[in-house]
């Protein structure tokens, strides 16, 4: 083993969430890094981008340090959180060594040379899985991390309204709120989710890129972005602006760009589509009115209600 390898082995494990990090990705990286370090495996949280407005609110509220932006993991041991798809992972992930996975999404094609620690459960939030890891390890969750983990569950489940929500998410949230001293989860959650509506001053491109995930669907590059607002009508005047940003992004080799404008209060999504083949999107999602925009009642989850249908349609 050369010096490089010896030094790399002594470096802390990097814990990283997906590109365009959201609150769940950032906080699960922080919480898993803390747990691993407590278990005698030095680990640090990193991120593939800066925090969004909601995550900024959460990190400030619980006085947690912002994970540094680090997009290269070559030569490092890595724990992936909140994703296992290569397009969402650091670009040079295959030059590092994945030693763990903590997630609540479909498996995204991750391959490893050695056995790894895997914690993947079909629950509403990665931090619900992290809560399970702390319980299994018999390690207490610090107050500040518990508060942020509660926020991540609120974020991913849209305050328990998303169809991805499970009883375990609710139970974990209640326990975490107790540790963090949050008496009224509903009031706290509404205040947190309101930060998503701070769209004034953001350009169409900023809004599109705020929560954009890129997928490889059977050889087709498909981008699905989502904006979740308490009042979706705030975005109505921005549609032309958003469509222009989507057309521009599509020029970067995409087959389709979808933008979900999700209205948390009305529980539905206004879907904007720019595609080489609008027909395939319409068929996949059962859109009735052809065109660049359609209202999808009851659709609020990208992961559960949009991605699987798209994957199937592209097969
Ligand atoms: Mn998540």
Image: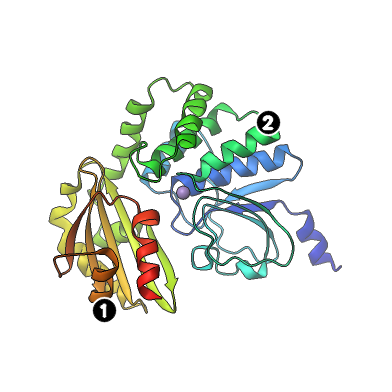
Q: Which residue sits at x=20%, y=43%?
A: 266
Q: Is the CB–ligand 1 distance for label 2 below 8 Å?
A: no
Q: Residue furthest right?
A: 1
Is residue 77 left or right of 181 when viewed as pictured? right
Question: Circle 1 sits in a helix, a strand or a loop, which is it?
Answer: loop
What residue does disc 1 label? 277
Point out the image quarter for the C terminus.
bottom left
Q: How many marks?
A: 2
- Marks 2 and 1 sit apart, C-alpha to C-alpha, by 51 Å
Question: Circle 2 sits in a helix, a strand or a loop, which is it?
Answer: loop
Residue 170, quarter of picture = top left
Q: Which residue sits at x=40%, y=46%?
A: 164
Where 264 sits versus 79, above or below? above
Q: Does residue 82 show up?
A: yes
The coloring applied to the image is: rainbow
Return the x and y of residue 292 as percentages of the image width and height: 17, 68
Q: Residues within 10 Å of mark 1 (few under 14, many from 20)?
A: few
Nearest the camera: 173 or 92? Answer: 173
Q: Which residue sits at x=27%, y=64%?
A: 285
What residue does disc 2 label? 139
- Which numbered marker is on residue 119? none
Return the x and y of residue 253 as percentages of the image width and height: 37, 79
Q: Residues within 10 Å of mark 2 (few under 14, many from 20)?
A: few
Where 161 sits versus 257, above or below? above
Q: Is the CB–ligand 1 distance for label 1 below 8 Å?
A: no
Is residue 130 left or right of 271 when viewed as pictured? right
Badge 2 vs badge 1, beta-carbon distance below 8 Å:
no
Return the x and y of residue 226 as percentages of the image width and height: 32, 56
Q: Does residue 202 show up?
A: no
Marks 2 and 1: which is nearer the front?
1
Return the x and y of residue 202 as percentages of the image width and height: 26, 54
């Amino acid at each position: 083993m050369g010096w490089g390898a010896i030094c790399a082995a002594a470096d802390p494990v990097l814990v990283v969430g997906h590109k365009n990090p959201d609150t769940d990705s950032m906080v699960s990286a922080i919480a898993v890094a803390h747990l691993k370090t407590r278990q005698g495996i030095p680990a640090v949280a990193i991120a593939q981008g800066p925090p969004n407005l909601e995550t900024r609110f959460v990190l400030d509220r619980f006085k947690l340090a912002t994970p540094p932006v680090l997009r290269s993991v070559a030569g490092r041991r890595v724990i992936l959180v909140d994703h296992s798809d290569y397009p969402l992972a650091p670009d040079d992930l295959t030059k590092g060594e994945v030693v763990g996975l903590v997630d609540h999404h479909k498996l995204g094609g991750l391959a490893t040379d050695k056995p790894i620690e895997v914690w993947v459960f079909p629950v509403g939030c990665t931090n619900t899985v992290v809560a399970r890891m702390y319980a299994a390890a018999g390690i207490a969750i610090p107050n500040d991390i518990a508060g942020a983990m509660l926020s991540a569950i609120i974020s991913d489940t849209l305050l328990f309204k998303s169809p991805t929500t499970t009883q375990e998410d609710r139970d974990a949230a209640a326990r975490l709120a107790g540790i963090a001293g949050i008496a009224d989860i509903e009031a706290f959650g509404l205040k947190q989710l309101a930060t998503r509506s701070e769209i004034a001053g953001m350009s169409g491109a900023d809004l599109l890129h705020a929560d954009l995930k890129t997928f490889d669907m059977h050889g087709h590059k498909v981008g699905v972005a989502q904006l979740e607002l308490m009042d979706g009508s705030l975005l109505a005047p921005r549609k032309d602006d958003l469509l222009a940003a989507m057309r521009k992004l599509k020029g970067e080799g995409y087959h389709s760009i979808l933008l979900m404008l999700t209205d948390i209060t009305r529980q539905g999504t206004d879907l904007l589509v720019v595609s080489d083949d609008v027909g395939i999107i319409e068929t996949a999602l059962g859109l009735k009115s052809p065109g660049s925009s359609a209202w999808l009642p009851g659709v609020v989850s990208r992961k559960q209600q949009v991605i699987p249908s798209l994957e199937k349609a592209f097969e």
